[in-house]
Image (tube, grey):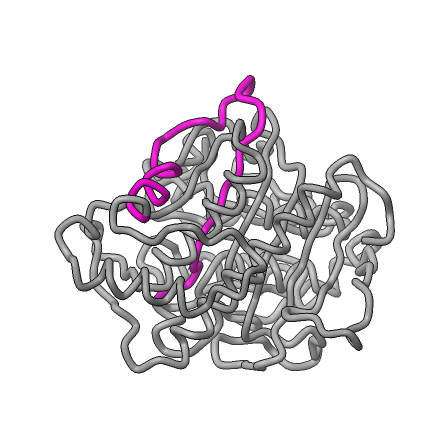
Amino acid sequence: MTTESLYDAELAVALTAIRAAAKISRAVLDSSNKGALLKADLTPVTVADYAVQAVLTDTLHSAFPLDGLVGEESSGDLHSNPALVDHVLSLIKECDDGSAKQAPSTPESLCSLIDLCSASTPTGPDSGRAWIFDPIDGTATFLRGEQYAINVALLIDGQQILSAVACPLLSPTVTPTAPLTNTTLSRTGCILTAIRGHGTFLHPLLPTSSSPPPILLPRHCDAVPLSSLRSVTSYNTLPSGLDPLHAQITRSLGAAFPDNDLLGWIPRWTALALGQANMTVWIYRSRTRHAKIWDHAGAMLLFEEVGGMVTDVDGRPIDLSRGRLLEGNFGFVAAPRGVHHLVLRAVRETLRKEGRGDLLG
């Protein structure tokens, strides 16, 4: 970072942790055995998810032992799968270069680390400091060798303070004229970070002595006309969303659809921060559906620090103080601050026009 901040020490630890995590994910990516299985909710999980969560937990907890931890995975499937436990422990040992603490060496210590961040708290408005992370966002695409991300965020009293996102297969140099998709790949990779009020920075994924210093990204969303909107979405892959409505809203604003098309939410927030896109709309099929905190916490800050604004479909700020699910919000509307109200109006008018007033709060 080129601007001093009260949270530079936290950022340094987050970068150490996320680079160790990226190294683990790449080792699994290059392996023929990814240790994949289905969780109870029928979503996939791999040996990388467990190993990365253990290393992130260990590194952050060792540096900040009083901070809370919230992560996606729990150790339930590990207890009944000794072979998977051995695979995770071997992977952590294989990738340990001494840069992160990476202490788990027994099944018991591994499961304890995983479960340190599997509780539903602490993210309340008076909860103090909590680290939120998603070890592999986009596990389905990860299994195919496509775009995925690793997310680390620091919340204080439920407010985003720090973000570190690693995209091990995303080029640090975007090509705005070409859509970014799950199969737009680069082994160069990159990391994006933000500290509230200090901008969003682009870092090399695995720096060397000749690597350039972090680059402060321009505030490309400060003055964007409605005619210059570009969307990022996840098209025809997630049953939770309403693709026809997303398409209708986006096209009503004069933007192409689907344009940039990425499965994981963290890669989508990253595309918005990089300027590859500047708008996304997501409407769930039911008001009972809520987003998961690790898919959005911190990564939204990357977009806000380049001039973006994020609310839900009802125009409310995203509330990260409810625990593991964003139960105070429904869907997402993200756009440059100056035109966000127009995008939000298009969302709500389309829902009324299409007879989906049941989705309006």
Residue lying at the far left of the rendered structure: 80
Residue 330 is situated, as x and y percent measured from the top left of the image, at 45, 38
The magenta-colored residue range is 110-139
Q: Please report the residue visible at 41 percent of the width from the left and 70 percent of the height from the top.
A: 94
Whether residue 315 can be seen here? no
Residue lying at the far top of the rendered structure: 126
State left or right for residue 62 relative to residue 275: left
Q: Please report the residue visible at 18 percent of the width from the left and 50 percent of the height from the top.
A: 40
Is residue 115 part of the magenta span, yes or no? Answer: yes
State left or right for residue 226 relative to residue 62: right
Q: Quadrant of the C terminus?
A: top left
Residue 356 is situated, as x and y percent measured from the top left of the image, at 39, 44
Residue 266 is situated, as x and y percent measured from the top left of the image, at 53, 57
- Of residues 67 and 170, the one nearer the viewer is 67
Q: What is the total number of numbered labels drawn onto the structure image?
A: 0
Is residue 8 part of the magenta span, yes or no? Answer: no
Q: Please report the residue visible at 75 percent of the width from the left and 57 percent of the height from the top.
A: 201
- Of residues 338 and 58, the one nearer the viewer is 58
Residue lying at the far right of the rendered structure: 3
User: Is 9 drawn above or below residue 213 in the view shown?
Assistant: above
User: Is 81 drawn above or below residue 169 in the view shown?
Assistant: above
Q: Please report the residue visible at 82 percent of the width from the left and 59 percent of the height from the top.
A: 216
Residue 347 is situated, as x and y percent measured from the top left of the image, at 54, 48
Image quadrant in which you'd find residue 235: bottom left
State left or right for residue 270 relative to residue 350: right
Whether residue 4 can be seen here? yes
